[in-house]
Amino acid sequence: MINTVEDAIGQIRHIQLDSEHSPEQILHMILAGGVSQSLFNVATGGHQPALQFLCRETRKISHYPVSGGIIKDDEKGRPYFSRGVKDFPANEHQNEFLGMLAASGIFFGTPVTTEQGREFTLADLADVAMKTHSDSVEEPGWSLMLFSLHPGVTSEWTNERGEIWNVERILRAACKLPFGAGSCFGTHVIEGIAFAVSRYCLERACKPNQLEGVWLEAHDYVAHAANLMGKNQKDDGSIPRCWFKEKKYPRTLKEWRESLLDIVSRRFRRARAIVYPTGHCLDALSPLSMFLVPAHPWIHAACYITADTIQSQWLRIGNELCAVTHAVHALKLLGT
Ligand SMILES: [Zn+2]
């Protein structure tokens, strides 16, 4: 098992990351490769840290698909990550970039340069995200990851409309979402909730069974999700897209849809059908890895099939960056 997992993690080195990958793909590579992930800058002909490229260099590239680079200045002169353009996405979902960078363990003092040449740090972008945060955010997973670290899981702040916010308030709304809602079959929401709970346990030096109130509710929400993933696990160890199905047969439209997509995908793109949902489900639980691993033998089987598929089907799966990077990030935390 250990060898298979290490080999799968090692495959990520074979991806030649360069400045022509979309910002979203580069961000995913930082999640898998960590802070030291490097990138080949086609414009300068040199290698550099991928994070540095995202934070300072995209504005310098002539005819960059996101014109002016990915860090923009708002009407008040404050920095934010651009959504990018169709076919070349950057921060497609609110706080996706900052949330994933938080989950990747990067330093928020990292300098950034905006389109107009102003100098800031990632912490300044996080401050703007706090000021502009409101109820309109549809998918709270990334906001939970960001705000659990910056300003912190128990901190309070006031947004520019004068509303008081904290992680608890976002968590309360997130735990009302039905399983499967949101991008990647709802796994990023679970990931955000698990991340917030793990930060809270770390900060309070408590175990999940000592939690109370919304924190207990959030923990139970993730535990219920993990339970369903284990229940819906396939014989080969992989988790289907419809991981959230409560009964034997699909009942809701969403359950039918994901079940059908799963069948089609398993028939025609088997490697992706295994690695994409299994890796995403595992990554959603990975923030709570220290509490989960011994309790769930199904996690072991799911890690194994994911690692084995990445390693043996690399030519089929290696260019599916979103699927592979989340899987590798999960394997690093859960699989060894
Ligand atoms: Zn995803």
Image (cartoon, grey):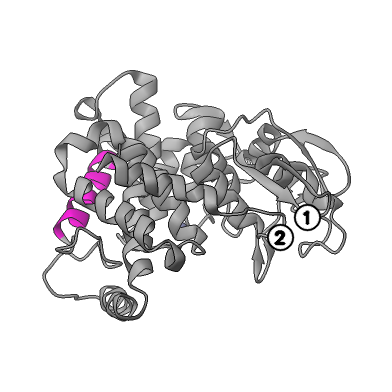
Could you say which is closer to the camera, residue 269 or residue 315? 315
Residue 235 as seen in the image, left or right of residue 243: left
Picture coordinates of residue 100 (x, y %)? Answer: 53, 45
Residue at the image point whose x is 47% and y is 52% from the top: 325
Could you say which is closer to the camera, residue 237 or residue 124? 237
Q: Is residue 227 magenta?
A: yes
Majority SS type along the magenta span: helix
Relative to 24, does residue 172 appear above or below in the rendering? above
Relative to 64, does residue 53 appear above or below in the rendering? above
Could you say which is closer to the camera, residue 306 or residue 159? 306
Calculate the distance from the C-alpha at mark 1 to the C-alpha at mark 2. Answer: 7 Å
Residue 211 as seen in the image, left or right of residue 104: left
Image quarter (top left, top right, bottom left or bottom right) of the C terminus? top left
Residue at the image point whose x is 26% and y is 73% from the top: 255
Residue at the image point whose x is 32% and y is 72% from the top: 270
Q: Secondary structure at mark 1?
A: loop
Residue range (magenta): 218-231
In which quadrant of the rendered view does residue 194 lie?
Answer: top left
In which quadrant of the rendered view does residue 258 lie?
Answer: bottom left
Residue to which mark 2 is pinned: 20
Q: Amino acid at mark 1?
A: Val
Is any atom of residue 160 visible in this view?
no
Q: Earlier in the sequence, mark 1 or mark 2?
A: 2
Q: Amino acid at mark 2?
A: Glu
